Image (cartoon, helix red, strand yellow):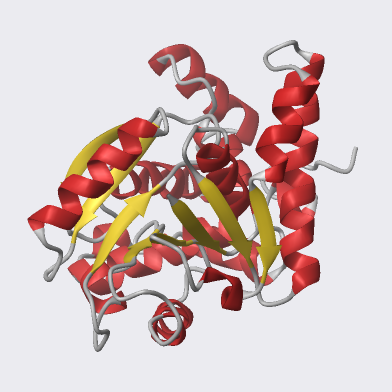
Amino acid sequence: MVVGVIGAGTMGSGIAQAFAMTDGYEVCLCDINEEFAANGKAKIEKNLAFLVKKEKIDQAKADEIAAKIKTGTKEICTDCDLIVEAALEVMEIKQQTFKELQEIVKADCIFATNTSSLSVTEIGKGLDRPVIGMHFFNPADRMKLIEVIKGGNTTDEMNDKIIAISKEIGKTPVQINEAAGFAVNRLLITMINEAAYEVMEGVASVEDIDTSMKLGCNHPMGPLELGDFIGLDICLAIMDVLYKEFEDSKYRACPLLRKMVRAGKLGRKSGAGFYDYNK
């Protein structure tokens, strides 16, 4: 099976690696230009080198996996059997990406989106085929969960196929009926948002809030540390989707979170968030 992954950032490159490490899959890793796509493959090669160092795989296997990944723009996806879109979490970008893809791919190519909160039904609006949600978790090459989300037009056949593919690449799929935030992020991001409120209100320090959740609830990471890892801009975007869809004040984004995003303090990727990563 040939899989096109649209978006070669952290999520896209991880998704591409997950497929490439599975026998029977080849990958077209795409972005808006060749340089971005090549940078995505370089991330994968760095991950593979780490696995070789840890003796998880040998160098020959690493070379074999890397060779299964072709990079370029979306035009290399003409023969793909499955597209997994991992572009920016912006509805208009995702819709336009699929509209352009439907003009060049095969009629039976499956369209899947890795959206973390947006409506799968809305993403597929006006297309010549339905879309399904295939939500991986970061780091996608290692995390086992995939949320398989049925949109309003997703067929049972497509749903069953994506569940089977998820299992083939070593993941554990969970069935989700479309709802804002799906199952995980509706719970997870609201917890991070509430932790931001605790910081803003002076309930406790960032470190003590995280320590409380790690030791009191056995979480591997505290909510603020996790927010930094995910990206505070992504957390804010998901909260805004939840608020818009449910129209419930409990999903109102914390003003501190919004202020930090406006200031460019996005977490690990920007060097600063609730923690300083430049030290």
Is residue 173 visible to the viewer in this orientation of the structure?
A: yes
Would residue 32 appear left or right of 203 to someone viewing this image? Answer: right
Going 71% across and 59% down the picture, which residue do you hit?
Answer: 265
Confirm whether residue 230 shows in the render: no
On the image, which quarter does residue 244 sit in? bottom left
Please indicate whether residue 145 sits to the left or right of residue 266 in the image. Answer: left
In the image, taking residue 128 as reference, residue 142 lies left or right, namely right
Q: Is residue 5 above or below residue 198?
A: below
Drawn side of residue 276 relative to residue 219, left or right: right
Q: Where is residue 174 drawn, in percent x and y?
A: 23, 37
Most extreme residue toward the right is 279
Residue 160 place in picture, x, y as percent: 16, 46
Q: Residue at x 24, y 41 (%)?
A: 163
Above or below, 122 relative to 63: below
Report x, y in % for residue 46. 80, 37
Q: Is residue 18 above or below residue 180?
A: above
The C terminus - image quarter: top right
